[in-house]
Amino acid sequence: MTEAPAPESPEATARRRRTLAIGGAVAVLAVGGLYVATHSGEKEKPPSPQERAQAITVVAAEQRAFSRTLTLSGEARPRIDVRVFAPTSGVRVTALLVDEGDFVKAGQPLARLDANLSNAQTLAAQAAVKEAEVAAARAQAEFKRADSIRDSGALSAEAIDTRRAQAEAAQAQLAARKAQLAEVNARLQGGYIRAPQAGLVLARTAQVGALVDGQSLFRIAANNALEVGAEVSEADMLAMRKGQVAKFQLVDGSTVTAKLRRGPAAIDSRTRTGEAVFDLPRDGKLRAGMFLRGTAKLPPSDQLAVPSAAVVFDTGAAYVFVVNDKNIAQRVKVAVGDRDGDFIAIRDGLPVGARVAASGAAFLRDGELVRPVSGEGAPAEAATAAAAANGG
């Protein structure tokens, strides 16, 4: 039988453990030394300046068709504003025959005047005509009698010619008296104030019993046709065309469609604006004096444009960052114009085809090296921050 080994003493166990620990440490050191030896020739390569540069989207400034919308405002007013006066003065109004809001026909009586004075003036004119008729007939008869005895020698040729001249003068006087009668009849209009044109009565200042003395008594919108005049800039005026459509909004939210009748006849030298006049439709809701707001789409025009996010505003001025062939972003001052969706027109300061930073512009500095990314490669965070910096 094999005998069991004698148990190990505590001192032997401790020596064996120390030996194992030292051996493990030596192994670790050996592996570390091997790693250092095999990697001691390699060095970490630092990133290049171009790799450290900010990534931005770069686009070219190009011509785009802009469809501009013009904002308009103005007051509705009669296209033909008719002021009606009494046919004579010094007479009283005895009756009012129409009210504000009534539609009247041409020649329709609006008010009746005191007939006593008008009748007296008519009778006086008629009497003057009658008197002239009698005088003309007498003068003509005397000339005929004188002419009938011309050969008898009872009257001289001079006397006969005088009677002929008197007859002709009497006829002329008769014609004048008849003209005066016609003028009285036309002026007094039978003792009525009449509408010179058909239309809607907008205002009535005539009062029963009031003495008329040259003041306007009625106001009529001829044919109830209304228009609106809106101030537009001289630049917008050049783009507008006769017949152009504009939509105006009423206070209740409904809209009416108007057409441009004429552009500004002149431009104010101070404001550089002029009045464009639009014809309004005959709409039951429209009233003269209403304030209207509207819009009109101008014909498309080609303009140099960049994305709105490419424009940075600083102390009241607009700038873009132009990226040159060395990828250096240079800040350039520009004059901006109209907006159309996500694009803004550049009126001055930028050539066609210039490469501009379309996103991340809000974070750039003048002269900074950038890493251009064409198309849609810029980080979304940069594009969002640029839009926020521009008030987008």
Image (spheres, rainbow, N blue to C red):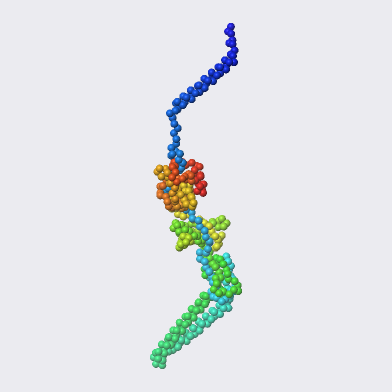
Residue 77 is situated, as x and y percent measured from the top left of the image, at 53, 63
Residue 172 visible in this rendered orientation of the protein: yes
Q: Residue at x 56, y 66 (%)?
A: 202
Residue 253 is situated, as x and y percent measured from the top left of the image, at 56, 55
Total numbered circles = 0
Q: Residue at x 47, y 48 (%)?
A: 311
Residue 190 visible in this rendered orientation of the protein: no
- The residue nearer to you, when weighing 48 against 124, is 48
Residue furthest to the top in view is 1
- The residue nearer to you, when weighing 312 against 44, is 44
Q: Residue at x 48, y 44 (%)?
A: 363
In the rendered image, the vertical position of residue 201 relative to residue 178, given as above or below: above
- The residue nearer to you, when weighing 280 against 364, is 364
Residue furthest to the front in view is 11
In the rendered image, the vertical position of residue 17 relative to residue 98, given as above or below: above
Quarter of the rendering containing residue 146? bottom left
Residue 211 is situated, as x and y percent measured from the top left of the image, at 58, 75
- The residue nearer to you, when weighing 284 against 249, is 249
Residue 326 is situated, as x and y percent measured from the top left of the image, at 40, 42
In the rendered image, the vertical position of residue 205 relative to residue 389, given as above or below: below
Placement of the N terminus among the 4 image quadrants: top right
